[in-house]
Image (spheres, rainbow, N blue to C red):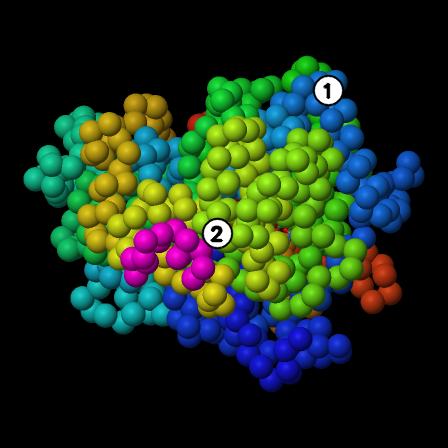
Amino acid sequence: MASADEWRQTACILCECNCGLEVQLGGPGGGHIEKIRGDRAHPASQGYACEKAHRIDHYQNGPDRVTAPLRRRGDGTFEEIDWETAIREVAAGLMRVRDAAGPETIFYFGGGGQGNHLPGGYAAGTMRALGAVYRSNALAQEKTGEFWVNGRMLGAPVRGDFEHAEVALFVGKNPYQSHGMPRARVTLKEIARDPARTLIVIDPRRSETAELADIHLQVKPGRDAWLLAALVGVLVQEDLLAHPWLAEHATGTAEIAAAFRAIPVARYCEIAGVAEDLVRRTARRLAAATSVAVAEDLGIQMNRHSTLNSYLEKLVWMLTGNFGKPGAQYVPAMLVNLTSSAPDGVAGAKPARTSPVVGARIISGLVPCNVIPDEILTEHPKRYRAMVVESGNPAHSLADSRRMREALGALELLVVIDVAMTETARLAHYVLPAPSQYEKYEATFFNFDFPANAFHLRRPLFPAPPGTLPEAEIHARLVEALGFVTEADLAPLRAAASEGRAAFAQAFFAALAANPKLERVLPIVLYRTLGPTLAGGAAAAAPLWGICQLFALHHGDSLRRAGYTGENPGEQLFDAILANPSGVVFAVDEYDASWRRVRTPEGKLQLVIPELLAELAALGLDEPPASAEFPLVLSAGERRSWTANTIFRDPRWRKKDADGALRVSAADALRLGLRDGGRARLTTKRGSVETVVEVSAMMQPGHVSLPNGLGCTYPDEAGRLRRPGVPPNELTASEDRDAIAGTPWHKHVAARLEAIE
Ligand SMILES: Nc1nc2c(c(=O)[nH]1)N[C@H]1C(S)=C(S)[C@@H](COP(=O)(O)OP(=O)(O)OC[C@H]3O[C@@H](n4cnc5c(=O)[nH]c(N)nc54)[C@H](O)[C@@H]3O)O[C@H]1N2
Ligand SMILES: Nc1nc2c(c(=O)[nH]1)N[C@H]1C(S)=C(S)[C@@H](COP(=O)(O)OP(=O)(O)OC[C@H]3O[C@@H](n4cnc5c(=O)[nH]c(N)nc54)[C@H](O)[C@@H]3O)O[C@H]1N2
Ligand code: SF4
Ligand SMILES: [Mo]
């Protein structure tokens, strides 16, 4: 182990940025992360880290780590079992369900959180070995609507270059707290300080980002569709479009112009609650800028008209010509595209396009999270009967916790792979414990930067606790127990690997050609054969070898520009990843690379999506009806300085706001007799909770806001289970979801609030 004052490289795992960190270990037995600073050598974060990173030891030394496989007894309590028994029984249980009801009744959820994406690859192997075809993860309760729109408009994922943008527009996103781009606060402050640049925020709340903004369009909650339609309406009606650019790069401009010429801008602004003059000035500023970068997030993605909103947001930057140039939108070169719409499931089988029971649209291979209970709680012969949950906590994090618990409880088999005893694990038949992300090799594929893009393979800081197994090993053992790969398949490859990389490559491709079924379990084959030859116990990183080879094949130019100019640049990249503890740049692009990644038939941006133009036409001139029973709009799940999804289960990591107060405007507080720090009862059609109240100048009347990630159960010092704060999904309903993508309306829950004496 390292000496106490040695700085070691790792990363923060609390949000998609995964900022590089340098840490010193210490405390009892050297088992704690004691000193933490941003790692200047990290190519993306360059030394940046926000305040939350300093609390990661509360994850590493969380109070309810699981350190032996658990099996549920008939009375609902758990007993510890050994790994051999656990793997044998889980494999047998999955085969039983497969043989009795069909492989498509085995459902996979998860695969990684904000910092750990290697497990998803291994799990795909296990699922393909079983023949399972349906899966989902948290992206299918936030981003799938946007993915669907991207698929239709350009056939590729897209991001904004805020660092160089003249104008930055955030729609339903509060990057000052939630980040979602490298060094967010530095970039936001630079834009805000520079008189030549303009920061625009669309948010009903005076968020920290809105506070910095030059223009804050303080929309009424849930009315973004009218606001964005008005914005596009002004662009069209005042003829602010980038005509020559559109003629060259887009299809459907005339049809879009026709659709938006009819938008009653004044009335739509009124419905949205934003002054028409401000909307017009905003449209003109966007049109006049040399570059505009735009990002949308949960404020519209978990709201009414969410897919329509994603579409309107993209029309704003497309119609003003903001793609494929500095400071505008781009398509990054990705090692692994987590957002692809590529068919998945059984090799060679027709891809599943809708869910088996309710027929919900599957986007990027993901079943909408909100339909999962409907897919289980039914007599339908193709209902899901077994579920493997890995690094996800559907019983807490998905809509409608009560119904989700009922659904999970109705499964014939629920297997949870996690580090902690989560709400979902408590319902499982088997809990398989994994080492924490600081006890194994781990990485994320949230690599979205441009023109240079970086990847970071993190090394373990601590030995894994005895009794845990890394996901790679769990899945390898499961696939072996299923009888899908045998020692006879692996031995020749292992022998070749011991002779060197070149011999291995040759043997590997020959084995794939001779035995195509191995393709279904590639990560596991690589882990078992190439893995043991990697120095430092990096076996779990072996699939990156294949990923690097594929990247070299498809993105040779980006790789060469990043300095990998040898004879075998894929091999060179893999070695660099293994050798560099702070991460490496794996792609460098020129700005026109984005155009080459557009996958539409003509290579142009496709402006027209008929389904969404129909939804636009149906918006109407009337205010959405108000409810007398539930007059308030609750946003259930705001990101704050002291929230990090459910990665920390122990509330002691929070220095402030320990109970996650409900934010309420002064006007509503006065009307309802609430005081700052007092308590209130918050009720929706689905549930009723008690909460602490914070009277906040951020809120507009009629809008209240709860943080996300609270209300996790954890054992206190005396071993009693505690649940501080409100678990937001006790208040949400699975039927409240977008018609196209099935994404939830978490930011728009009708609610009532009463003071508690
Ligand atoms: N501190 C912290 N950071 C995080 C996370 C965390 O848990 N804590 N989680 C990470 C994850 S998983 C994600 S997905 C991102 C999410 O990041 P964000 O989407 O930026 O975070 P939220 O606070 O959920 O929502 C953003 C904003 O939407 C606004 N909003 C609410 N209703 C509406 C509406 O009707 N219209 C509009 N336009 N806006 C509305 C809210 O007021 C809020 O300011 O954050 C990531 N970063
Ligand atoms: N009402 C409401 N609900 C929401 C939101 C909201 O705004 N409002 N936000 C949603 C969003 S955007 C997201 S992304 C989700 C996030 O919700 P989840 O997908 O549940 O994600 P996390 O909180 O990131 O936790 C994932 C799990 O990974 C486990 N874990 C950590 N490290 C490891 C590891 O190394 N291996 C394994 N196997 N497990 C590990 C943790 O213990 C945890 O149980 O929540 C969603 N839920
Ligand atoms: S929470 Fe996000 S922005 Fe903050 S240090 Fe961690 S990875 Fe970086
Ligand atoms: Mo998320």
Q: Is residue 52 magenta?
A: no
- Compared across the picture, whether 662 is left or right of 713 comes to left
Image vertical order of residue 9 relative to residue 593, above or below = below
Residue 55 in percent (x, y) is at 61, 70
- In space, the residues marked 2 and 1 are separated at their CA atoms by 39 Å
Where are the magenta residues, as a range? 563-576
- Compared across the picture, whether 632 is left or right of 714 comes to left
**Three-letter residue code for mark 2:** Arg
**Three-letter residue code for mark 1:** Asp
Which label is found at residue 501? 2
Q: Is residue 570 magenta?
A: yes
Residue 229 in percent (x, y) is at 28, 37
| Residue corresponding to mark 1 | 99
Image vertical order of residue 571 relative to residue 90, above or below = below
Residue 617 in percent (x, y) is at 30, 25
Image vertical order of residue 478 relative to residue 713, above or below = above
Look at the numbered disc 1 and give the secondary structure of its residue. Answer: helix
Which mark is in front, 2 or 1? 2
Report if residue 216 is visible in the image.
no
Report if residue 655 is visible in the image.
yes
